[in-house]
Image: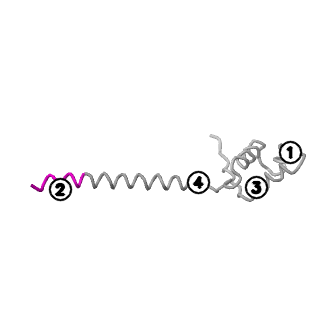
Amino acid sequence: MAIRKPRRTYTKEFKLEAVQLAESRDSKTADIASNLGVSPNVLNRWIREYHADTQHTFPGNGKMKEPEEELRKLRKELADTKMERDILKKALAFFSRESP
């Protein structure tokens, strides 16, 4: 059975500097990636992610981007509100049946 290497993690600052370095140099991305000790595919993915959303790029390990986090909170709040509404409907129906 092969032993797996632990997954390497990089800070947001490292990723941003790598992207800036790749864009400011005339060198190939593969050369820059090898100098940084990362795969060329990883560096290219960082560049794509950076250009897709420069303001919310690389939020951190396990964290969502701000718009996605807000959407998740709003969906949870909506689900909770619907559940409360359904409980109140059932309570209203229950109490309206018992009173003559």
Q: CA distance from mark 2 to mark 3?
A: 61 Å
Q: At 55% from the left edge and 55% from the top edge, which residue is drawn?
A: 69
Q: Which residue is mark 2?
A: 95
Q: Which residue is mark 4?
A: 67
What residue span does the magenta drawing correspond to?
A: 90-100
Q: At 45% from the left edge and 54% from the top edge, which residue is drawn?
A: 76
The image position of residue 7, as x and y in percent, is 66, 50
- Is there a contact, CB below 8 Å, between mark 1 and mark 4? no
- Type of the residue with mark 2: Phe
Q: At 76% from the left edge and 57% from the top edge, which residue is drawn?
A: 14
Q: Which residue is mark 1?
A: 31
How many neighbours does mark 2 have within 10 angstroms: few (below 14), some (14-19), or many (20 or more)?
A: few
The image position of residue 31, as x and y in percent, is 86, 45
Q: At 19% from the left edge and 53% from the top edge, which residue is drawn?
A: 94
Q: Magenta stretch: dominant SS? A: helix
* SS class, disc 2: helix
Q: Which residue is mark 3?
A: 16
Q: Is residue 47 magenta?
A: no
* SS class, disc 4: helix
- Type of the residue with mark 3: Leu
Sooner in the amino-acid sequence: mark 2 or mark 3: 3
Q: Quadrant of residue 10?
A: bottom right
Tell me the quarter of the image containing the N terminus: top right
Tell me the quarter of the image containing the C terminus: bottom left
Question: What residue occupies the far front of the structure in this picture?
Answer: 100
- Type of the residue with mark 1: Asp
Q: CA distance from mark 2 to mark 1?
A: 74 Å
Question: What residue occupies the far left of the structure in this picture?
Answer: 100
